Image (cartoon, rainbow, N blue to C red):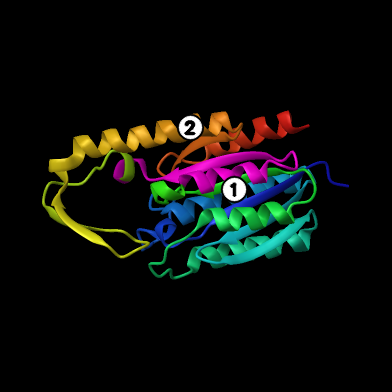
């Protein structure tokens, strides 16, 4: 008999696969690699507690859905799907996260603890739609935890040498050529403001917001899981 229902949601879009993995070590993970390992670690804890776990994977399309179950066979199947997500070769396509979250919300009938791994790459115009979809996930009294998955060194601190570089949007293919040092300060301020706004908005919607830096290991992820599981009751 299971005690808890947990649903893992994995953003498998092209931005999560950057940079391409040359080797698979704890020190060379990209965002999808980090999310896959973190999800597997949570699943392992759920398995020990005999809890039921389900999973959704999306990119520019809704790739996979599995209902919450606690069997050994089900766990193996989900681990296989995580491995597939990791090995996918992603093309540059735009992902509408909110459309998939609405679909997942429709499928989750029984109260669950929901963990979403995403880098929150979307246009400003889509932010309202995204939070509407996150709110939809909460309608059936689900508890939602957003693991905002990002590379702190590159995406927040803009840690690049000051040689001319081409920066490419991995979802649209658009690019700009510039010297990183020329915009570093303004960039850092803008991104930090975005992160702060995101945290504030999640608080307003009663969504647990957790910054998940891929360089920082899994302690914060697992601690969050343990705390939320205890609160979920």
Check disc 2 and report its element: helix, strand or loop. Answer: helix
Decide: few, some or many residues near mark 2? Use Cα within 10 Å; few <14, some 14-19, many ≥20: some
Q: Residue at x 53, y 64 (%)?
A: 85
Q: Position of residue 87 (x, y in %)?
A: 49, 68
* C-alpha span from label 2 to label 1: 16 Å
126 sits to left or right of 136: left
Residue marked by disc 1: 133
Q: Quadrant of the C terminus?
A: top right
In magenta segment, residue 128: yes
Q: Residue at x 52, y 47 (%)?
A: 130
What residue lies at 27% left-to-right and 62% top-to-bottom? 174
210 part of magenta stretch = no
Classify mark 1: helix, strand or loop: helix
How many numbered discs, if any?
2
Magenta residues span: 127-154
Q: Compare residues 201 and 66 and report the one nearer the observer.
A: 201
Q: Quadrant of residue 155?
A: top left
Position of 28 relative to 90 (above/below): above
Residue 199 is tagged as 2
Q: Looking at the image, is mark 2 or mark 1 nearer the viewer? A: 1
Nearer-the-camera pick, 212 or 148: 148
């Amino acid at each position: 008999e299971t005690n808890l229902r947990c649903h893992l949601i994995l953003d498998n879009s092209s931005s999560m696969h950057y940079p391409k993995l040359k080797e698979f070590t704890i020190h060379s993970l990209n965002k999808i690699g980090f999310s896959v390992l973190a999800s597997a670690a949570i699943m392992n804890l759920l398995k020990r507690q005999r809890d039921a776990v389900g999973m959704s994977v999306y990119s520019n399309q809704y790739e996979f859905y599995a209902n919450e179950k606690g069997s050994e066979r089900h766990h193996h199947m989900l681990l296989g799907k995580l491995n597939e997500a990791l090995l996918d070769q992603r093309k540059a396509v735009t992902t509408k996260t909110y459309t998939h979250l609405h679909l997942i919300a429709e499928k989750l009938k029984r109260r669950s603890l929901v963990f979403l791994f995403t880098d929150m790459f979307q246009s400003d115009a889509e932010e309202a739609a995204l939070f509407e979809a996150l709110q939809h996930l909460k309608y059936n009294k689900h508890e939602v935890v957003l693991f905002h998955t990002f590379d702190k060194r590159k995406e927040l601190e803009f840690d690049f040498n000051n040689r001319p570089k081409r920066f490419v949007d991995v979802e649209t293919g658009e690019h700009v050529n510039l010297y990183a040092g020329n915009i570093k300060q303004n960039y850092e301020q803008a991104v930090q403001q975005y992160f702060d706004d995101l945290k504030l908005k999640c608080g307003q919607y009663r969504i647990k917001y957790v910054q998940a830096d891929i360089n920082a290991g899994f302690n914060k992820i697992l601690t969050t899981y343990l705390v939320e599981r205890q609160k979920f009751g």
